[in-house]
Image (cartoon, grey):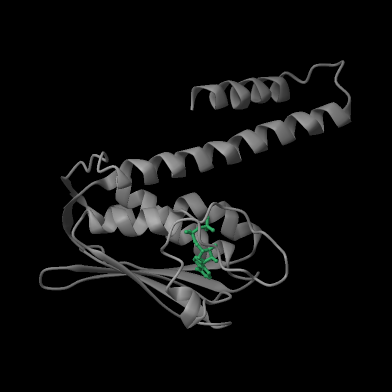
Amino acid sequence: RTPLNSIIGFSQLLEKQEIKDLSDKQKEMITYIKNGGKHLLEMVNDILDLSKIEAGKIQIDFKPFDFGKMLKRAPNIIKALAYEKKIEIDLNIPDDLGWINGDETRLKQVMFNLLSNAVKFTDQRKRIGLEAESGEDNFKITVWDQGIGISKKDQEKIFDPFEQVDKGDGLNIGGTGLGLSISKKLIELHQGTLTVSSKKNEGSRFTILL
Ligand code: ADP
């Protein structure tokens, strides 16, 4: 990751310094370098995560934490993305959801992946949501959206690495197709399950049982 840090870091410095001699076109190019660097860093992070998981080298740091508190904060990181698309976020998380013994950083990573997918694959002015409930000996977390949905056939593929559903319009929304396979494996390392139910053009529900 170190080489990428200098690409991102120095392009950010150039952007901020507002050097007089730079033309608007050059400034625009610096922004492209910075954004390209950030995108590449996300891809490198995903590929490193997946390789670590597959090599059995990932460290899951089990510690008790307040699960409800973490879940309530989770949507904050996607709020700006949702706001841009005028997508409303419904939260249904009881205050006393309870504590869980798990890796908070890794579980946050899973929530971020599911919530950012929900925003990414949902049209403007629709809704997405996050629900949580605790059973006798488990937690059930659902991320739902009113987005484009996923056909039965594609639902079997999306948890495999590098799988992205062909939208048939030649548009690439971005991403690596690794987020869901990493998320599923991280949940399984917590002895949990991650499943999907969805209907084309009606939306999707991703459910975690822990
Ligand atoms: P990425 O988002 O980087 O493409 P993921 O592994 O997170 O990778 O998702 C794989 C594919 O599953 C996506 O490219 C998309 O086709 C499909 N997908 C994931 N989440 C949703 C969703 N909420 N609604 C519709 N399609 C989805």
Whether residue 88 is visible: yes
Residue at 79% in and 31% down = 29
Of all residues shown, which one is farthest toward the left? Answer: 136
Looking at the picture, how far across and down is residue 138, in whole percent? 16, 68
Q: Quadrant of residue 20?
A: top right
Looking at the picture, how far across and down is residue 70, in whole percent? 31, 52
Q: Is residue 84 left or right of residue 195?
A: right
Q: Quadrant of residue 16?
A: top right
Quadrant that contains the C terminus: bottom left
Q: Is residue 10 left or right of residue 78?
A: right
Q: Is residue 193 left or right of residue 11?
A: left
In front: 166, or 120? 166
Residue at 71% in and 20% down = 14
Above/below status of 102 relative to 83: above
Q: Is residue 21 left or right of residue 32?
A: right
In front: 177, or 206? 177
In front: 72, or 179? 179
Whether residue 68 is visible: no
Residue at 52% in and 76% down = 150
Tally the marks: 0
Residue at 45% in and 39% down = 45
Above/below status of 38 relative to 77: above
Looking at the picture, how far across and down is residue 18, in whole percent? 77, 21
